[in-house]
Image (cartoon, rainbow, N blue to C red):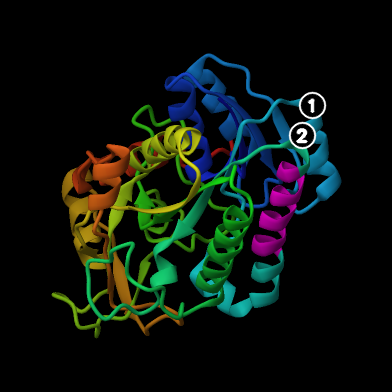
Amino acid sequence: MNVLLAGGAGYIGSHTCVELISAGHDVVIADNFSNSCPVAVERVEELTGRKIPLYEADVCDRDAVEKIFSENKIDAVIHFAGLKAVGESCEKPVEYYRNNIDSTLTLLEVMKKHGVNNFIFSSSATVYGTPETVPLVETMPKGSPTNPYGWTKFMMEQILTDTANANPDMSVVLLRYFNPIGAHESGRIGEDPNGIPNNLMPYITQVAAGRLKCLGVFGNDYPTHDGTGVRDYIHVVDLAKGHVKAIDYADAHKGTEIFNLGTGVGYSVLDIVKTFSKVNNVEIPYQIKPRRAGDIAECYADPTKAKEVLGWTAEKTLEDMCRDSWNWQKNNPKGYEE
């Protein structure tokens, strides 16, 4: 299939691009580089030996999206082009609603015009809100997300479900990500956020590389084994392989299907810090800070459905995630900036 990756130059998009090409698919990338870099696409080309059609475009821009669909035969869309920082979404809610929902609507409108009916969506565990129990299962009712980022994912899932209900030819796969970390084992692509990182692992790697002085740990008074927040961390390459399985599934099924993409194991912030230090022999100084707005105590997946229906399971360990994250950062201390 020829797959359009909206936001394909980003962290998850670039890794998914590698896995799709490895599985025999063709890809087209659209990205406005607001939190990514064209060098990532060059590195993907280097890893895959393929030239990738790349459009510098905002997928909220209907004319730009129309141009992509007119110039390429697109069979499926994977939508990664969302703003994604929980804390920032609390400070900039309008920006999050505008970008994340507009981009989805624009893609759907242009897809309809061109008869494209396969849509894979980067959703999030945040749609479960503050769960009463863990692990989280797809059949649980969606909760009330604790931040605008989560609400955008919640709303986009509804928009996509309604669209599939109205169009019997439509296939929508909602992939609820847990917490992707790690990097391609080559060390050529990885997570390179603009500015100060909002996510844990790039902050740790930048402290390890000397770019930042100290890790801030937000809250040590949660009801968890060490008081710090517990999440389901998944290697980005495992996550990327889940998208390949989702593309194959969408090609053979109609309607809407939801899958958790996680490992099923929860690790705390301090578990990550200690494992990173042990595996890489690098000390990470950290400071306990107040809780961050919109965070919950613990969140991890029940990934059974993805295993049974997609034939997908996460294979890489926390040690692999920590090793690959550091391999990326130490070989690219300034990220993609040469």
Single out the residue that lies furthest toward the right: 63
Name the kind of residue labelled 1 in the image: Glu
111 falls in the magenta region = yes
* Quadrant where the image shows the N terminus: top right
Work out whether residue 334 can be spotted. Answer: no
Badge 1: residue crowd in 10 Å (few <14, some 14–19, many ≥20): few
Report which residue position mark 1 lands on. 71
Q: How many marks?
A: 2
Image location of residue 148, percent across then percent down: 56, 75
Name the kind of residue labelled 2 in the image: Ile
Q: Is residue 11 above or below residue 46?
A: below
Report which residue position mark 2 lands on. 68
Single out the residue that lies furthest toward the left: 225
Q: Is residue 44 above or below residue 85?
A: above
Residue range in magenta is 99-112
Question: Are the two marked residues, 1 and 2, in contact with CB atoms closer than 8 angstroms?
Answer: yes
Q: Is residue 226 above or below residue 37?
A: below
